[in-house]
Amino acid sequence: MQFVSISGQIDQLSTPCLILPVYSEGEQDTLTEAFDQANDGQIANILERGDANGKAGNTLLIQMPASHKTERVLLVGFGERGKTSEQDFNKAASASINALKSLPIKSVCSALLNVEVINKAPQWKVRQSVIKSQEALYQYNQTLTSSAPEAYQLERCEILVVAGISSDEIEQAANTAASIANGIEVAKKLADLPGNICTPSYLADSAIALGKQYDSLKVTVLDEAEMEELGMGSLLSVSRGSRQPAKLISMEHCGGPASQKPVVIIGKGLTFDAGGISIKPSSGMDEMKYDMCGGASVFGVMQMCAELNLPINVVGIVPSSENLPDGDANKPGDIVTSMAGLTIEILNTDAEGRLILCDALTYAAKFEPEVVIDIATLTGACVVALGKHATGLLANNDELADELLAAGKNAGDKAWQLPLWEEYQPQLKSNFADLANIGGPAGGTITAACFLSRFTEDYKWAHLDIAGTAWKSGSDKGATGRPVHMLSQFILDRC
């Protein structure tokens, strides 16, 4: 959907639908009152009757007289005036598009920038309006035929200019937000594809296609023979049980000077994870196609960087494989040698994400990174600890951790930091190798990060465990696109 700024008197706008804010308590918005006064107090009557209650996310569509320039009005609740929170605004922005997307209209006009949100600037409201609108319009249809949903009609959203922000500032914020939203959509589309389509080779082909689309992107794909030459015995051990060859994908966005050290992001790309010999329970195993959401988020961030042609160097790395049971698959008790030269005892073949990430983390050193961030649906323990709301964050550098936490808070894509203390390292002790690939049931998210930390001692590094935030289960099953927004904000802040 295209987002543009417009100006004009609220009661003189010509639009198929005008989106107006209403509040549950206190005086109504000045723009809403101005429109209402020009239309015989219709909105005041509706609120008095209780047909619209102003609660955050509540909507009511009003049909205007046939002769009116404004054909429809959508009232959207923002809670109590003066107390609208970030969550209230996001909820209302999503609800407004959800209420309109099935209507036979191609454009809308939004007056939502006039809503005061606690501690948020107008540019933030523009960005969230764009991103939440795009998310509401997302629909999966790649493998649907007769049951495919109808294409949405909405193509354009006009954002009404209000005090405190200019037309140019609105369009600049909207342009940035649209690129972030496009990155989120790329991540969701890849993650929602089934494992028989989205294989490691499919991801590699997708990266090559992205590189052809943008001049700033340099794409390299290593096959198994090339990885073997580099000594990536840990990564390659995971793919032994699959007929799909592993791929190591790197995408370099060269937007800054050659002397600038890059931000490196690494995403776990397990396109399907059955657990290997330590096979998972069958219930819910279909959702293990989402074990590549970390890799999908790297694609989304690289799309955003290239689309905006950001003046910064960013490298995206996706180690990709399947993890399946087979006569040649990893067995509990096997010992493999990583690219770093450390030997690893595999106590559980379902702890495979760290086995592919550790070699990718070693490989990342070749880019002489400023910082390295890995993103992975790594541990069920993170879901137990933080639920579905916060991404787990662990880091060997507090300044980097603080940057990510601030970016997540600003984006509304939040993380929570867990300790990465030396006291946890002994849980990875092995009698037969340099370290084991699991540390027991206690502190599983932390010991997984401790494992990865052994391969990141030469640079600043942070780990994002998105096992709880990368997708939704149940009737809303699907990828969320997190943490593309957080990482995009992190990179934009560094620009």
Image: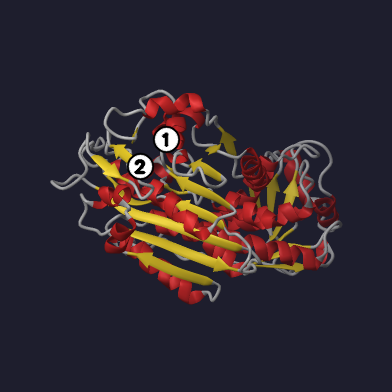
At x 69%, y 54%, the residue is 493
Q: In the image, residue 21 lies at what x, y percent?
A: 74, 49
| Residue 441 visible in this rendered orientation of the protein | yes
Tell me the SS state at disc 2. loop
Number of other residues with Cα within 10 Å of mark 2, as a class: few under 14, some 14 to 19, many 20 or more: some
Question: In which quadrant is the C terminus drawn?
Answer: bottom right
Out of 375 and 20, give the one closest to the viewer.
375
Number of other residues with Cα within 10 Å of mark 1, as a class: few under 14, some 14 to 19, many 20 or more: many
Out of 418 and 184, give the one closest to the viewer.
418
**Residue highlighted by disc 2:** 342
Q: In the image, residue 182 lies at what x, y percent?
A: 55, 62
Residue type at the position of mark 1:
Ala
Q: Mark 1 or mark 2, which has the lower sequence index?
A: 2
Q: In the image, residue 383 lies at what x, y percent?
A: 45, 33
Out of 464 and 371, give the one closest to the viewer.
371
What distance separates the C-alpha of mark 1 from that of mark 2?
Answer: 16 Å
**Residue highlighted by disc 1:** 448
